[in-house]
Amino acid sequence: MSQLSAEEGVELQTLLKLFLRSINDSISGAASAECAEEILLHLEETDKNFHNYEFVKFLRQYMERSLGTVVEEETKNLTSGDGQHTVGSGHDALIHIVTQRTRESAEYKQMRQTLKNTIIMAVEALINRFEEDQLKKEMHKEKQRSQSVHQFTDNCSDSDSSFNQSYAFIRQEQLQVLAEQLNSSRPKEVRWEALQALCCAPPSDVLSCESWSSLRTNLCAALTDPDLSDNVLQYFAKSFSSSPLNLTREIYTSLGRLFSVDITVFSSVFPQIRLINDFQKEVTTFWIRHPEKYMEEVIESTFSLLTYHHEYGSTSPRSEKPLEPIHLLALLDIKATWFKKWMHGYYSRTVVFRLLERKYKSLIVSALQQCIHYSECCERFTNETNDAESAEQQNTGKSVYSRRELEYAFFVHSVCVLGKLLIYTNGRKLFPIKVRKRKGVTLDYLLLCSYDLLFVCSDVLSPSSLVMEVLWMLCERTECAVECLHQTSVICTLLAPVIALLNGKSPAATLSLIADVLAHIANTDRGLALFLYENSLVTCAAHVVVQFTLRLLHKEFPSLSESDAYHTLCGAFIFVCRQIYNTFEGLQVLRPYGLHRALAAAWKQTSSLSERVPTPVPGAAAGASTQELQNMLIWEETLLDSLLNFSATPKGLLLLQQTGAINECVSYMFSHHYLQTNPQGTFIFHHTNPVQSSSDTLVGCLCVSGFVRALVIELWAALECGNEDVRVVRPKPTPMDPIDRSCLKSFLSMVNLLSSSQSVWELLGRHPLANKSEYSLREMPTSVPDLIDRLIAVNSDAKIHSLFHYEQSHTFGLRLLSVLCCNLDSFLLLESQYNICSMLLQSQKENVVELDTNNGEFIIDSLSVERNHVLVRVSVVGGSSERRLPPRALQEGEHPYPWPMFSSYPLPYCYTLDPPKIQQTSQGKTSADEVTDTNLYINVIFIYGIFIMSFLSFIYRYGNYLKLLKDDAVHNMTVLMKHVKIFLSTQRVKTSSELITQQDGYPGHDWLASTVFLIMAGDMDRSLSLLRNLSSLLVSAFIWPARIHASVHVPVEVAESGILPVYWCTAHYVEMLLKAEVPLVHSAFRMSGFTPSQMCLHWLTQCFWNYLDWKEICHYICTCVVMGSDYQVYLCVAIFKHLQPHILQRTQSQELQVFLKEEPIQGFKVNNYLEFMEGLERSYRNLVLTDMTSLRNPVE
């Protein structure tokens, strides 16, 4: 059955031929035979018509006929009763076994051999027939040698390349004859026929023949004949594409030397210039593989051509100058692409600079002359009517260039060449350059001329846009921008039209372009310093820009506000302001102007107007209303985006919150920067970091916008679902890290979201866990409580079975819990609502070898180790020298985890270190173990609106460990907390907010009160007296968060925002000083997507508990009270400076957030950094302390 008949063999040959023709496009582009074979092997995957080819259908029918019986028998045997147990119920397994046994059968081997022999015979027959056809074609070509193979069809068109022509072989004797026939003394017809034959010959044979010298001479002579020049250029183009560099270099240099410019033969020289330009742009792809002298000859020949017949200053500006090669090259390559490619690589750029400096500086001189001449004549060109030129263009059509258009093309080409020179140091070293009628053109003079061109906007030949592109290019190079643009004269020149408009003079037509340049300058540190601090300016540039922007927003310029480009112009200057106010020092300068209020007012007005625009009706004329609505929406988004950029700094975030547009800004951020920019990846947007960590109001906005839901779903998909659209080629490797790299970004995003206790309260407060009896495998969490229920509180078989990767996912949840519990207020909320500790202890109790006995050994695995770490972290209080946290990694040897695990209290003593030596009172003492046993589960106490189990015991253990408290300390502390709550409640404003943190007083624990209680050795009266006295000092607003929360001492709007002064003032200046004093740390935070303000808020709200030793906590409070509240800023900067090596190291491994939250501040001593803090005081006290004293009016 597997044998093929003769008829089938013929049919197979025919079908194979048709098949090869069908896939010709697929395999013709292959670089080698191996590549073509690879394409054929994967053709079924790449060609959607694969199964529709008749050849494939024939093979399939033949295989079914040959192997159908074998497949049926094997399938029947495997699915029968005896063989069913070997296959199982899997359909894929059945197919795999049937296929394997079929391939091992004798019928398959016979079919394969028969098919192979038949196809080999068919291929050989096709090859023989192909060779016969090729022989017939060669004989036919010999008869028609006088006819050309191709025609040179460029005709000055830029639509195609001159390369990649075809040819046939030729003998050396024939080349000798052709050289004689090309002699200029021969008739034109003979020379034309010789050129046609020469074009059919391989250029390599022609260039290597003995008669090449005479051939080149005759070809160059023919190039001057209009009737023969096209054929000569055709041959040269063929030579450029297929000859080695030494030969193409010879042809190129010959073209350059023999080029002559005559306006009467413009059409004949234009293709020659185009061929030269094509070679200029292509030669950079291969000249690096050859000796430098070849490249140098090409470059020198080009420069020699472009400096041909230049007569500097010999004619007056209005006299007609002869057409030169540079004019034609500028028309063909107006943006000087050839020069940009030559300057791209260091290999060629070095040669260009050397030749320009030593021999061809006249090329730069001519470009400078053209730029200066065009700048001086722009106004004259604007006022001219050009009637004669217009009439000429009407008569001759578009094929004629006017003198002005030629000069403009040359000007554009010159600007692009000069701009490319200026971005390199060696290019700037060429200046100053001597030009006729001028002592020397300096770099500053050239730039001033370019700025003057910005103010010219007359017609389509306006140079302003071109100059803008060059200035943008200069701004992108730091060194170049400092030398060329970051100058006082530049700022003054650019601001001159703006100042003139502020003074009532007519506006410049290119203000939006000026704004773009200003924005690029302000985007760098050096440029921003010019805007803010330059003393040599008459008026601070930042003040000029913001004043002009405010007047634009208020529509105080009728001539501008009524124009169609008003929104574009206003948006451009708002963008300049944005570059200023999204920095700390810039916001300090612009804040008094109230730009945020002006932007919010403009947004509200635009939003109300956009609602009034009628909705387009189907069938109605799609006229002005649709376009007006679109423009309104674009302008509204521009204003929202500008408002959103205020959140780049902590104080800017407060200003944004006061505008009342925070909800819309967060929604805009989510919809544009999450859903559109990165719909499938992890979203870490730099604006969200302060938003997520500072205010309960803003966290509520994130929930409403859908950001939190999207983040939770994205995390779950990365953790449990994986990428379903990725084709599985090999099994996914088992993660070796506790958190897989694919989930790390989602983990860090969640850490950022839950960075502060306020965000945790809003997301988790009064939200119980689901604790369902059954979870569907397709059920995904959509909120943070759902995530905790599924990943952290895994306390039932239903939750375990609902996870595809139980160990990995639960480890992820425990790691997240560990970071959350580093914030003591967040831990107390989790413990009071979800009994986290009891849940972890129960899991440890069940994780033993023998469950029935009380003395079973703990099973050491990743989950038990992680649970043990979390339990120790939340149960022991202290700094780096006061408690010992067990590591998460196992050790080598007989005891991989020497740290004792526990499933009930008290904790093993090894996790606490020896207490520091502190002066004791003579009154009663109680051991830590005794206190733990007797006071572990005290009664539930209602404090500040939440239930906190064992909370006072939590603080009491730390005080007893320090040997500071007496037996009645728990009672005294309870009374102190109640008195403090009553005292602070009389100073709170009543808010109508529905946020949890704005109800029932301060949401977290009063850590300063607890610290003072320990300082006073448990004396309630002395502690309360000290706190009352402290409340009258300015410093209390910053070191005592519970005292300033919703306080009457700040504006009602600020009190209702929930943003504490420790964030919008202290953390703001910490970041500002870090940028100036510890720039490496500031850069590390910028790279990590984390902000120093988040850690400052974390440290300061819990009074450095668990981060500093007790002695340093006392030093912190005393330093701030005695030295001044601004020392809180300086101390935080000192801590970051102390941690700089660790911060730089952890940033590289993407562990900065987790490191700063989980690790104590080891080795930091306040007295070691007093000198550093005093230096900061001398430099910044006037600024920082002045702003702190303006607590009652922080937004003004």
Image (tube, rainbow, N blue to C red):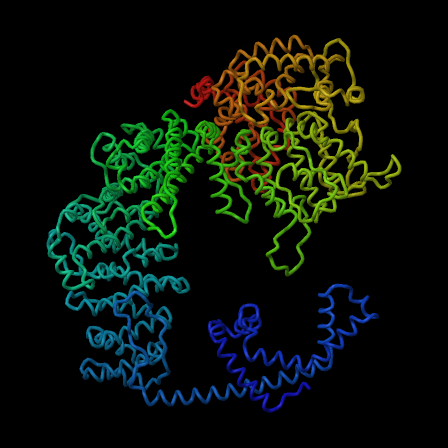
User: Considering only vertical position in the picture, is 1191 above or below 15?
Assistant: above
Q: Position of residue 741 (x, y in %)?
A: 62, 47
Quick one: 928 or 457, which is closer to the camera? 457
Quadrant assignment, res 1010: top right
Q: Position of residue 685 (x, y in %)?
A: 50, 40
User: Considering only vertical position in the picture, is 921 above or below 402?
Assistant: above
Task: Please state if 744 lies on the left or on the right of 188 as rendered.
Answer: right
Q: Residue furthest right?
A: 853
All told, the count of numbered labels is 0
Q: Residue at x 38, y 42 (%)?
A: 634
Quarter of the figure with the C terminus: top left
Task: Please state if 698 lies on the left or on the right of 200 as rendered.
Answer: right
Quick one: 111 or 737, which is closer to the camera? 111
Quick one: 128 or 323, which is closer to the camera? 128
Quadrant assignment, res 832: top right
Quarter of the figure with the N terminus: bottom right
User: Considering only vertical position in the picture, is 942 above or below 556?
Assistant: above
Q: Position of residue 356 (x, y in %)?
A: 28, 54
User: Considering only vertical position in the picture, is 799 above or below 1038?
Assistant: below
Q: Residue at x 32, y 59 (%)?
A: 338
Q: Position of residue 1084 (x, y in %)?
A: 52, 37
